[in-house]
């Protein structure tokens, strides 16, 4: 910068002091800004950690919901397995129904006579019930897996 009028030593000193004061003011502002940036960066790091934690929380809540359903279903498995054990006996008895029904004496209208009525009625019920046993037994096969998985829900 060129000056048409030369500066005195005093004027030059004052100009330099003014320039240095302005520079110092800018330095203070920059240091203040830098401090705020460091704080913001620390806050951003914490925010990222919080966002990761929130994602894990959502996953855990979703898993907990499935665990409640799983535990509820597993509690029914005990009853189901107990019933399935009776199915073997029921199916065994149902196979004898054909033999029993052939032994029943029928009248001319093809209707069972005497105690044969009672036997034929129970055999039909027994055979219908036994037909559902295979479905029940198939379902109980999955109960062991279900109960094993449900035990992890308590961990």
Image (spheres, grey):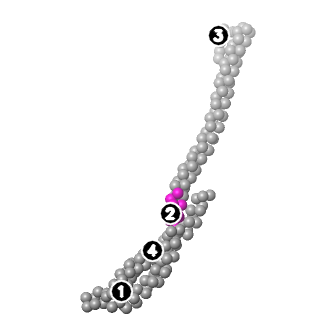
Residue shown at 35% from the left, 81% from the top = 121
Q: Residue 31 occupies which quadrant of the picture?
A: top right
Return the mark for residue 115: 1
> Helix, strand, or loop for circle 2?
helix
Return the mark for residue 73: 2
> Helix, strand, or loop for circle 1?
helix
Give the CA separation, mark 2 to mark 4. 17 Å
Residue 109 in the image: x percent, y percent?
Answer: 25, 88
The label nearer to you, 2 versus 1, is: 1
Closer to the camera in the image, 27 or 152 = 152
> Helix, strand, or loop for circle 3?
loop
Give the CA separation, mark 1 to mark 3. 138 Å
Check residue 41 for magenta coloring: no
Query: Main SS type for the magenta part?
Result: helix
Residue annotated with mark 3 = 4
Closer to the camera in the image, 28 or 18 = 28
Give the CA separation, mark 2 to mark 3. 96 Å
Look at the image and tell me in which quarter the N terminus lies. top right
Residue 100 in the image: x percent, y percent?
Answer: 39, 88
Does residue 22 show up? yes
Residue annotated with mark 4 = 135
Check residue 71 for magenta coloring: yes
The relative height of residue 42 versus residue 27 in the rendered view (above or below) is below
The label nearer to you, 4 versus 1, is: 1
Give the CA separation, mark 4 to mark 3. 108 Å
- Magenta region: 68-77
The label nearer to you, 1 versus 3, is: 1
Return the mark for residue 74: none
Tag 3 or tag 2, which sits nearer the N-term? 3
Are there few (<14), some (14-19), or many (20+) residues within 10 Å of tag 3?
A: few
Kindly check if marks 4 and 1 are in contact, taking CB atoms under 8 A apart as contact.
no
């Amino acid at each position: 910068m060129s000056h048409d009028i030369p500066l005195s030593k005093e004027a030059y000193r004052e100009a330099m002091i003014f320039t240095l004061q302005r520079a110092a003011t800018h330095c203070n502002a920059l240091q203040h800004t830098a401090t705020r940036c460091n704080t913001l960066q620390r806050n951003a790091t914490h925010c990222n950690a919080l966002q990761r934690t929130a994602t894990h929380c959502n996953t855990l809540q979703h898993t907990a919901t499935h665990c409640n359903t799983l535990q509820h279903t597993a509690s029914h498995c005990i009853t189901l397995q107990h019933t399935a054990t009776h199915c073997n006996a029921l199916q065994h008895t149902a196979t004898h129904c054909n033999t029993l029904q052939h032994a029943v004496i029928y009248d001319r209208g093809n209707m069972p006579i005497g105690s044969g009525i009672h036997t034929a009625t129970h055999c039909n019920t027994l055979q219908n019930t036994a037909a559902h046993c295979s479905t029940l037994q198939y379902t109980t096969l999955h109960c062991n897996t279900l109960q094993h998985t449900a035990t992890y829900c308590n961990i």
